[in-house]
Image: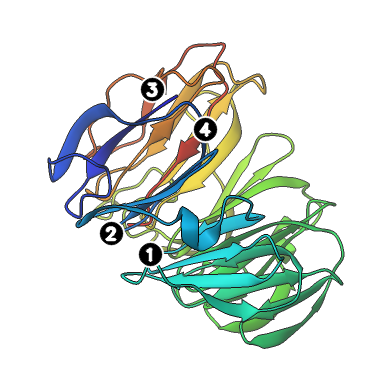
Amino acid sequence: MKLCCNGFNLFGQLQVQAPIIYEFTPVFQFEVINKIFINQTYSLLVTNDKSLIYYKKGVVDITSVIGKDFLKITCSDDRILFIDETKQVNIIELGNFMNKRIIYEKCVKNISIGSKITILYTLDGGLINVPQPLNFHCNRICDIKSGKEHCLLLDEEGNVYSMGAGSRGQLGHGKLDYEPNPLLIEALAGIKIKKIATGGWHSCAVSQDGDLYVWGWNSNGQLGLGKKNDEAGYVSTMATPHVVDFFDDTLNCLLVSCGSRHTIIFLGNRHFSEDISIFNVRLLGTFIIFLNLEGHFRISTCPSHLKHASRINTNKSSSPYISSSSM
């Protein structure tokens, strides 16, 4: 199985010497790759039997720290959060990879972490922003995503809730206030959402019908609204969800992944068939990874400094996995 990347590599997070990878290049290759997290200064790669950190000082094997049988793992620019085999929640700080610290001793259903937010979803449907329990209870939460300072929650009915910092409109409530507890995003009420994603200060949601909703900060065009910052009608902050118009009305959004200031979506006809579109990937903090079921790389070359939405064709039989850096 191969992972191919391009973009910013100044901190050696992509295991090659070049500070910038201008063309998609096979970077990691293992028999099985279960997870990959690309952050500002390091990458975390999880195989069947190893968990490896790639950063400026080389490669660190943290398998002995987190174990092979951990239940769940996620990370932010400066922290790794995981549930160990004893069902306790642990954290590892950037630069101190061989030491872990228990932050919650009880079993939880899910975890999520940002630069300034650490979310635990408890077995009884409660929510903790470590160490503070929140005024929220729901037994049907199926996904949690965190940006730098905010969090989205998706329940089984397709409702989306948000909490945390809202200074760039990333909460979707039509205002820029901080929300200490999750609130239902009213603008999405009645729309069944199936996928959510968070960038640094923007948010995305994909509906059951394949519509892509975006909101939050649009500093680098990450909302895909089609206007440059020097054009009439440009919006720097979108405080309520807005549906994106695609270049082809026959296509639906199937997958979405966010970096700090860019968004990658996979478009098709609900059978993973046609296209990948990249919205405004114009900063050098961009990594794009694509795997199909066979583990082969099936994506054409695309530079990391794109200034407009572009389309990359893929093999029709591919089932994609896309990931973005947090830069």
The spot of residue 145 in percent (x, y) is 59, 59
The spot of residue 94 in percent (x, y) is 35, 69
Q: Earlier in the sequence, mark 3 or mark 2?
A: 2
Q: Which mark is residue 312?
A: 3
* Residue 138 can be seen, yes or no: yes
The residue where tag 1 is placed is 77
Q: Earlier in the sequence, mark 2 or mark 4?
A: 2
- In what element is the residue under mark 3? strand
Which residue is at a point 56% across and 83% down the rendered structure image?
178
Query: Disc 3 vs disc 2: which is toward the camera?
Result: 2
Asked if disc 1 and disc 2 are in contact, CB closer than 8 Å, the reply is yes
Q: Earlier in the sequence, mark 1 or mark 4?
A: 1
> What quarter of the picture does the N terminus occupy?
top left
Q: Which mark is residue 41?
A: 2
Give amino acid for label 4.
Tyr
Q: Earlier in the sequence, mark 1 or mark 2?
A: 2
Does residue 174 appear to the left or right of 314 in the view shown? right
- In what element is the residue under mark 4? loop
Q: Which mark is residue 321?
A: 4
Front residue of 156/267: it is 156
Q: Residues within 10 Å of mark 4 (few under 14, many from 20)?
A: some
Query: Disc 3 vs disc 1: which is toward the camera?
Result: 1
Does residue 295 appear to the left or right of 10 in the view shown? right
Asked if disc 3 and disc 2 are in contact, CB closer than 8 Å, the reply is no
